[in-house]
């Protein structure tokens, strides 16, 4: 047994309280499962207890199967980072997009990828996912469902593919990483409010959107694509930057995005009224909204987004930003892509 960042990590190949034996088992590398037991109103923790015996039986022949339960916000970042430094073969997020988001940020530190502290280590730590969250939108890009038994078989096969990671830079030049979708304005504000209603399950996205609309006003913005000249965007309702396709509980907002393309897909909704979302909601979920006249799409390596101050209201920090469903503050922001940055268990 060992402790990682104040969270209990138990590896099944070692008896609790016993010394690590000098046997062939010590040559096994760790598969570290980072679990948010409170995810999906506690369902993640309950489901994890049910599937862990089967997962352990399936994997323990070849790997040290380790579990670590998070105890609060950002704990998964620390656990993942320490596991990678310890030479883990894989770090697997168990939960929803929020848990996955934290684990991905644990793969980086001070703007650089985290590496094993053992200089002799040659194999990179892979990222894995058992989707057990409320939305699990990143899993949808791969066609995965919240089926833990399917996930166990996928992880046991150990097939990997290099995937891209998005990077966001804020006012203080702090780097933040995302795998799925980053978004600006109405959708980000809706996500901010939705996070307060997670106890209602997927209904939280509907409640969050309705609450966001009460104070919403389309805003003029400017963007800089791949370090070219600034472009004026009037009446922006939402601006979405996708490394993958889905957000908000299954809305296919950036339908042409793929996390192995080396590009970010930017979709801009302009001059949307509340009734536009009612009439076009089906298209947004199916990903057929790109043909609408007030929807535009562009593929980029980087994009900067700023509010046009002269057209904004008098309040500060008025335009929300989120990434992978997690609130990230307010504009301005810069977004870019790290092609093939992580090995992902597919």
Image (cartoon, rainbow, N blue to C red):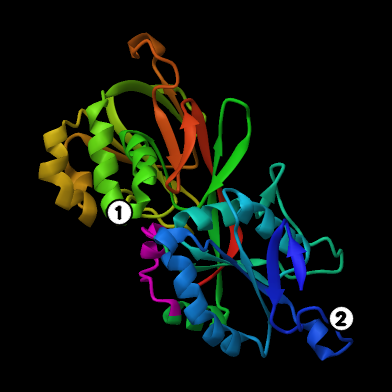
How dense is the environment of label 2, judged by Cα within 10 Å: few (below 14), some, or many (20 and up)? few
For image coordinates 58% across by 41% down, the residue present is: 176
* Comes first in the chain, label 1 or label 2: 2
Question: x%, y% of residue 164?
Answer: 53, 55
Q: Count the numbered circles shown.
A: 2
Question: x%, y% of residue 245?
Answer: 36, 55
How dense is the environment of label 1, judged by Cα within 10 Å: few (below 14), some, or many (20 and up)? some
For image coordinates 23% across by 45% down, the residue present is: 290
Give the image quarter of residue 131: bottom left
Which SS type dominates the magenta stretch?
loop
Give the image quarter of residue 65: bottom right
Instruction: Tell me whether the residue at label 1 lies in contact with that at label 2, contact meaning CB atoms closer than 8 angstroms.
Output: no
Determine if the magenta segment contains residue 192.
Answer: no
Question: x%, y% of residue 94?
Answer: 52, 66
What secondary structure is found at the residue carrying circle 1? helix
Viewer can see residue 95: yes
| Residue placed most toward the observer, 23 or 218 | 23
Residue with the mark numbered 2 = 19
For image coordinates 29% across by 48% down, the residue present is: 205
Give the image quarter of residue 316: top left
* Looking at the image, residue 69 lies above or below residue 297: below
| Identity of the residue furthest to the right in this view | 22
Question: x%, y% of residue 163?
Answer: 53, 60
Residue 92 relative to residue 217: left or right? right
For image coordinates 34% across by 13% down, the residue present is: 313
* Looking at the image, residue 218 lies above or below residue 47: above
What secondary structure is found at the residue carrying circle 2? loop
Determine if the magenta segment contains residue 142.
Answer: yes
* Looking at the image, residue 93 lies above or below residue 212: below
Magenta residues span 134-148
* Looking at the image, residue 177 lies above or below residue 304: below
Residue with the mark numbered 1 = 200
């Amino acid at each position: 047994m060992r402790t990682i960042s104040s969270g209990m990590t138990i590896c099944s190949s070692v008896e609790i309280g016993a010394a690590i034996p000098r046997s062939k088992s010590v040559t096994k590398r760790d598969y570290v499962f980072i679990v948010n037991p409170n995810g999906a109103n506690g369902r993640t923790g309950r489901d994890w207890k049910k599937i862990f015996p089967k997962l352990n039986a399936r994997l323990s022949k070849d790997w040290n199967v380790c579990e670590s339960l998070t105890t609060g916000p950002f704990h998964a970042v620390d656990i993942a980072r320490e596991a990678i430094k310890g030479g883990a073969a894989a770090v697997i997020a168990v939960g929803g997009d929020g848990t996955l988001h934290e684990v991905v940020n644990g793969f980086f530190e001070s703007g650089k990828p985290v590496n094993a502290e053992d200089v002799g280590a040659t194999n990179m730590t892979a990222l894995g996912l058992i989707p057990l969250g409320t939305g699990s939108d990143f899993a949808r890009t791969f066609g995965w469902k919240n089926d833990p038994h399917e996930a166990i078989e996928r992880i046991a096969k150990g097939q990997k593919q290099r995937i891209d990671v998005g990077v966001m830079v804020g006012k203080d030049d702090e780097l933040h990483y995302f795998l799925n979708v980053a978004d600006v304005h109405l959708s980000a504000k809706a996500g901010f409010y939705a996070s307060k209603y997670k106890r209602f399950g997927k209904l939280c996205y509907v409640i969050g959107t309705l609450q966001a609309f009460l104070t919403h006003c389309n805003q003029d913005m400017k963007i800089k694509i791949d370090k070219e000249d600034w472009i004026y965007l009037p009446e922006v309702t939402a601006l979405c930057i996708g490394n993958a396709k889905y957000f908000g509980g299954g809305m296919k907002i950036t339908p042409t995005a793929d996390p192995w393309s080396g590009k970010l897909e930017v979709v801009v909704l302009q001059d949307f009224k509340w009734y536009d979302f009612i009439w076009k909601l089906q298209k947004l979920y199916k990903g057929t909204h790109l043909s609408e006249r007030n929807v535009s799409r562009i593929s980029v390596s980087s994009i900067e987004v700023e509010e046009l101050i002269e057209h904004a209201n008098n309040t500060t920090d008025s335009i929300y930003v989120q990434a992978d469903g997690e609130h990230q503050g307010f504009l301005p922001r810069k977004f870019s892509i790290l092609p093939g940055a992580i090995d992902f268990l597919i």
